[in-house]
Image: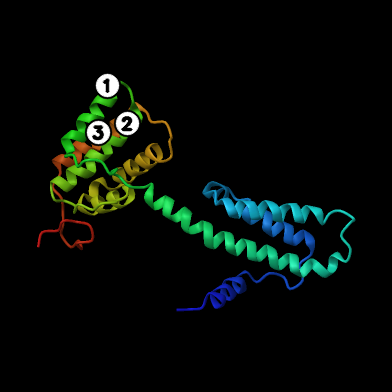
Amino acid sequence: MIPVSTSLAIVLASFEPPVDPDRGDAQRWAAEELSKPQYASAKPSWIAEIWNQFLDWLRSLNGESISGANIGVPLIGALAVVLIVVAVIVVRPRLNARKKASAKVFDGGPALDADAFRARASAAASREDWQTAVVEQFRAVVRAAEDRAVIEVQPGRTADEAAAQLGRAFGDAGSRLEEAARTFDRVKYGKAPATASDHAAILALDTRLSAMKPDFAGKSANGLAVPR
């Protein structure tokens, strides 16, 4: 295992900052990196507190009360780089974990068959709840493929993974599957509005796939229920 100190040295070296950055460079590095929306959205409370304190300190350097400012310029640059490294190391895994957790097709509720999801989608469409109709209809597409043993049952499968796997079995519907997956993610996790046409497109895809015979020829068994 590589020691933490060695890992930090490698990460710091990759930034290759100027040997002698001025105060403006240091402020710009920190502001540009740590003010990005993804760091704020992760809300790591202690990072935010340290960042706010660091910003206050940088602002204080604009005053006339700081003497010998040139002596501290290299230190300012080093602190800015360290803060960037800490933010990337701490926040990025949280963002990746959140993304992974929020992309699943199925929630942790009771297992339902494809017809149950279709009934839910139809009921939602009848009351013009297009968000729910889109989500449940896409789930019907995926569950129908599992019920037919086209793809393996895979807990935690994402919409993109489902579309890619089904696209290998139903090549002619590949582009429609990708579009349906994007619609599902946009509506379910992006909280975007859905329309009747969004639901109609996924319903038509569900109907089409139900009538198609999967093609496993030359396909690996990565996610597919390939007959052995």
In screen coordinates, is 133 left or right of 3? left
Crowding at label 2, few (<14), some or many (≥20) Cα neighbours within 10 Å?
many
For this orientation, the residue located farthest to the top is 127
Crowding at label 3, few (<14), some or many (≥20) Cα neighbours within 10 Å?
many
Name which of mark 3 and mark 1 comes first in the sequence: 1
Mark 3 or 1: in front is 1
- Give the Cα separation between the discs numbered 3 and 1: 14 Å
Are the residues flagged by discs 3 and 2 in contact, CB closer than 8 Å? no
Q: Quadrant of residue 193?
A: top left
In screen coordinates, is 184 left or right of 150? right
Q: Amino acid at mark 3?
A: Leu
Q: Looking at the rendered structure, which numbered label has been put on residue 149?
A: none
Q: Does residue 5 lie above or below 35 as drawn?
A: below
- Give the Cα separation between the discs numbered 1 and 2: 11 Å
Q: Amino acid at mark 1?
A: Ser
Question: x, y (%) of residue 158?
Answer: 32, 49
Q: Amino acid at mark 2?
A: Thr
Instruction: Out of 11 and 50, give the one closest to the viewer.
Output: 50
Residue at screen point 59% across, 64% down: 85
Report which residue position mark 1 lands on: 126
Report which residue position mark 3 lands on: 203
- Give the Cα separation between the discs numbered 3 and 2: 13 Å
Residue at screen point 48% across, 78% down: 2
Q: Quadrant of residue 34?
A: bottom right
Report which residue position mark 2 lands on: 132
